[in-house]
Amino acid sequence: MKVISHFLKVVDGSVRFKSVSRLGKREPNKTRPIKVVLHNVRDKEKVMRSLSKLKGNESFNGVRITDDYTIEERKLVNSWIDKAKQKNEDELKDSNIV
């Protein structure tokens, strides 16, 4: 909990967490992700916008912060990625023709 509190103070001191839990099964010599639930979407957006404050802070070396999407949201994001990849491939093919 101290680590999460410290993290939230660094990125945005006004944000407080609702709950914190470890994910996955405990195994020796393996780190597990931490799920942090915030009180509202506005707090999440504050945190995500402030992540650049972590760069260069040795306390957070090796820490990755990602959005937690629903299955439907992940499918949508993946479809956008596939469309972007296809568009890039098409543009490369077109540029080689000229």
Image: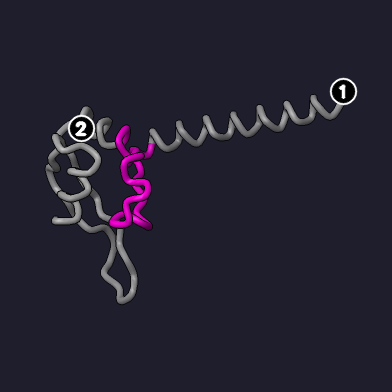
Residue wearing tag 1: 98
Judge the density around disc 1: few (<14), some (14-19), many (≥20) Cα neighbours within 10 Å.
few
Q: Nearer the viewer, residue 50 or 36?
A: 50
Side of 89 where 63 appears, left or right = left
Q: How many marks?
A: 2
Magenta span contains residue 50? yes
Q: Where is residue 49 in the image (x, y as percent from the top left)?
A: 32, 32
Residue wearing tag 2: 43
* Colour scheme: one colour
Up-down relation of residue 22 to residue 90 (above or below): below
Segment colored magenta: 48-71
Residue drawn at x 45%, y 31% as measured from the top left? 76
Judge the density around disc 2: few (<14), some (14-19), many (≥20) Cα neighbours within 10 Å.
some
Magenta span contains residue 52? yes
Quarter the N terminus occupies? bottom left
Q: Position of residue 4 (x, y in %)?
A: 19, 51
Residue drawn at x 37%, y 49% as measured from the top left? 56
Q: Which of 45 and 23 is in front in this view?
A: 45
- Among the 4 quarters of the image, the one containing residue 11: top left
Q: Nearer the viewer, residue 77 or 48?
A: 48
What mark, if any, has residue 82 been given in the picture?
Answer: none
Precedes in sequence: disc 2 or disc 1: 2
Residue drawn at x 28%, y 66% as measured from the top left? 25
- Among the 4 quarters of the image, the one containing residue 66: top left
Q: Which secondary structure, mark 2? A: helix
Quarter the C terminus occupies? top right
Up-down relation of residue 5 to residue 73 (above or below): below
Q: Distance between the residues labelled 2 and 1?
A: 49 Å
